[in-house]
Amino acid sequence: MIRFNNSIDGMQLCAATSSVFNASADQCIARVEKGVLYGGVTYNGYTGKGGSINIHMTGFRPHWISRDLIWVSFHYPFVQLGVKKIFGQVGMHRPEVLKFDYQLGFKLEHVIKDAYPEGDMALIAMYKEDCKWLALKPRSLVSQKG
């Protein structure tokens, strides 16, 4: 099940990405199965239609990302909000995370030296016209507010 804007999900997801979830301004989309949080995405820093938004993604279980979660994770910023670009920050010391992000279609945009205690930060981005996931058709999205 895909759950939208649950502040507890948002706090747990952000804690895992060393970020902070602001329930009054940030958005959260999570995959929850039988009450267990599998993973999800949070968004912050929305600059407006035609602009950009920051995305944080994390998973807590193997195979945490489902077809429906992939679709809605990109549909929300690109179609609902109308941004032209989404971006994220990843430590260069996390090659497995960078590999995952590159497989999703993100591209390295910039490296910020010494942004983390462990070293450099990769600023990655995806433009709407490059997003292959918008062509997916969701299989079974069930919304539950809470």
Image: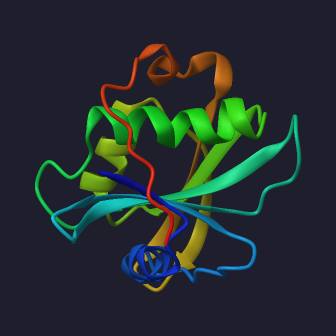
Rendered view: 25 above or below 81: below
The spot of residue 42 in percent (x, y) is 53, 62
- At a point 21% along the width and 71% down the height, the residue shown is 35
Q: Is residue 34 visible?
A: yes
Q: How many marks?
A: 0
Which of 113 and 49 lies nearest the eye of the viewer? 49
Judged left or right of residue 11, residue 129 is right
The figure's colour scheme reads rainbow
Q: Of residues 136 and 102, which is closer to you in this image? A: 136
Furthest residue to the left? 62
Nearer to the camera, 130 or 91: 130
Rendered residue at 66%/41% (across/down): 77
Residue at the image position 72 percent from the left and 51 percent from the top: 53
Q: Position of residue 50 (x, y in %)?
A: 87, 34
Quadrant of the rendered image containing residue 115? bottom right
At which x and y percent is residue 95?
29, 54
123 shown above or below 14: above
Q: Is residue 61 left or right of residue 126?
A: left
Which residue is rendered at x = 85% and y = 41% of the image? Answer: 51
Rendered view: 69 above or below 19: above
Q: Considering only vertical position in the picture, is 118 above or below 32?
A: below
Residue 64 in picture, x, y percent from top left:
21, 52
Q: Is residue 59 visible?
A: no
Quadrant of the rendered image containing residue 68: top left
